Image: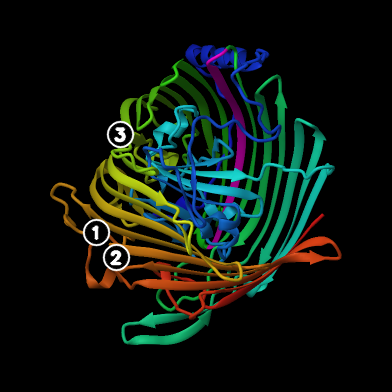
Amino acid sequence: MSQIDYFAMHVCKNRHSSLLHCGLCALLWILFMNPIMAQDNPKTKERDSLKPLVLNEVILTASKREFRIESPMPVQILSGKQLEALNSLSVADAVRYFSGVQLKDYGGIGGLKTINVRSLGSAHTAVFYDGMTVGNAQNGQVDLGKYSLDNIEAIELYNGQKSTIFQPARGFFASSTLLLKTKIPVFESGKTTNIRTSFKTGSFGLVNPSVLYQQKITSKTALSSNIEWLKADGKYKYRYQKKDGYDTTAVRQNGDITALRAELNLHTKFGSNAIANFKAYYYDSERGLPGAILANRYEHVQRQWDRNFFIHGSVQNSFFEKHEILTNVKFSRDYSRYIDPDYKTLEGALDNKYYQNEFYASIVNLYTIKDWWKMSFAADFSINTLDANLYRFPYPTRYSYLGVISSEMHWKRLDIQANLLGAYIDEQVKYYQQGDSQHVFCPVVSASYQPFTIKNFRVRAFYKESFRMPTFNDLYYTFIGNSSLRPEFTTQYDVGTTYSIEPKKMLQSISFQADVYYNRVKDKIIAMPSSNLFRWTMMNLGEVDIRGLELNTNFVFKFPQQIFLDLGLSYTYQKAIDITAKGTTYGDQIPYTPENSGTITSSINWKNWNLNYSFIYTGERYSQKANIPVNYVKPWYTSDMALIWNGKFSKIPVKLSGEVNNLFNQYYDVVLNFPMPGRNYRLSLSLNF
């Protein structure tokens, strides 16, 4: 398949919609435009004016990871100083430390980076940014390398779904969920303005300045803005291996990137306990696509441009006692351009442009029926459109209607959640092909139980059915698409436990989390060759069986002289095999899925100094479906270190850090023939005013 599938984006032309579409849009407009009047609730305690509402969630905080003890869904969290302790430039760098995750990384700062959780595929992971999904209806890929950690407060990874029934319907439909949360302004007494400036530089010609500005407008309203510029030449040494061993050392070419990211956030509270948030986001980049190192070809000339923009507003309020309502509206506009001078067309070099628009609206109502029983109803509506300058392009439009009825029962030692998911997807195309529609219903059941009187010990389990729609590329890509594709269905089973103790001696705390899981993917969408290798077709043929074990532990030690040691360990065993009937690779491990992987994260803190070390190991894998020697990919590991100093200079808070990544200079590929950097360095300085 063409490399374009990885690098496309979208926007739309106005089209006529059906009466049903217009009616639902009008209903949503009425719901969102009605003024939401808050009513005083004497049982509601006053909250911090700028912090979000929290609904019945008990959090156990560990140094490197946080485990939600009562959550029936496995969750891993990195937040605050935990994120700062990792040598991470983007969200993609940080999620590598979660267990059960494979990060596909095509190399360098500008390389595409996508997440695959428990071998279900990248399209089965929903990415939420401040409560709103970041989607890509065209190719299902969300490039996590675009999201900087400069303004990220927390990253949460849920297997199954976020363990609350008070969320938009989209949050229930994915097989796993990655949540990104930006920093909420916090002001010291007497201050109304916070400014943080930072500058990073290092290997690959990295230049990365950023500014974060926070302004307290009133006691209940704050504005924050963040702007960041990144430039790197992407040149690094790597080794090219032939059959008889390493014989060439070369420099990676065409891996440069120039990117600008800007965000604006408005947080406000009104009435007794209502909260409103507004976000505007813009990302603009140009990058080279270094390509695969094959047949002694070391240089590539393909280029890609991306422009992503979205605005998002949300309001959380209450009409009456024991009721909460959450509304969201979002509009996004994405543009992508891909140029390949080596691929000639009748008009010259290949120059593909993609435009995508999305309008999304959701409403969630939560009712507290009894102290121990809550129910919610969530309804979402979205329109996705895709245009391109391609020959015989069908110009698809997708209308999605999602609804979820949820129930949660909470007792002292037992939590039970049940969800019924329903979806209607209406697909329409302008030219050449007939659109299609899909009706889907999926159940979800989960529970968390404290079997003994031991505090902070829980056993949990969940069963979940979910699906993912074929992408626009799967359905309509010229010479490849198949408009009759069925959705991929996943069935997930999980049994696990969480436990924590705090001895309060030299060993300050121990936390533990373990899960055994089984996943089944049905009607997996795969590409099959047709008349020639330049024309492929998409088909529902695949079926995958996935069995795994995840272990996460965290230790916090306190030594004399106020020295603290934080140690986190994670391990994943996973057997993900192809069980497609009559398939030639029946029983083989699916591509890029190691049986064994693990991480170690550690941090030593003393006064103003912090020394961090992290280690990542990924076992042997195969690059193709057939588990034969020619497709074998060697195990790889990396070690990263950082030294951080937090102090003051002329009464100005200063943070200075130095990092060494890939400390032992290992040459490796995450994706075969896309070599990763060897040893590299980074320096950063930040000032707070």
Q: Is residue 137 left or right of residue 283?
A: left
Q: Is residue 153 left or right of residue 162?
A: right
Q: Is residue 336 magenta?
A: yes
Q: Is residue 239 above or below residue 572?
A: below
On the image, the x and y values in percent for residue 227 come to 73, 51
On the image, the x and y values in percent for residue 348 come to 56, 57
Of the residues under marks 1 and 3, which one precedes in the sequence? 3
Quarter of the image with the N terminus in it: bottom left
User: What amino acid is at disc 3?
Assistant: Glu
Question: How many angstroms separate mark 1 from mark 2 (CA)?
Answer: 8 Å
What span is colored magenta in the figure? 321-341
Q: Secondary structure at mark 1?
A: loop
User: What amino acid is at disc 1?
Assistant: Gln
- Give the labeled residue for mark 1: 589
On the image, the x and y values in percent for residue 130 come to 59, 39
- Give the labeled residue for mark 3: 465
Of the residues under marks 3 and 2, which one precedes in the sequence? 3
Q: Is residue 69 above or below residue 256?
A: above
Question: How many angstroms separate mark 3 from mark 2 (CA)?
Answer: 28 Å
Q: Is residue 604 magenta?
A: no
- Disc 1 vs disc 2: Cβ atoms closer than 8 Å? yes
Q: Secondary structure at mark 2?
A: strand
- Give the labeled residue for mark 2: 622
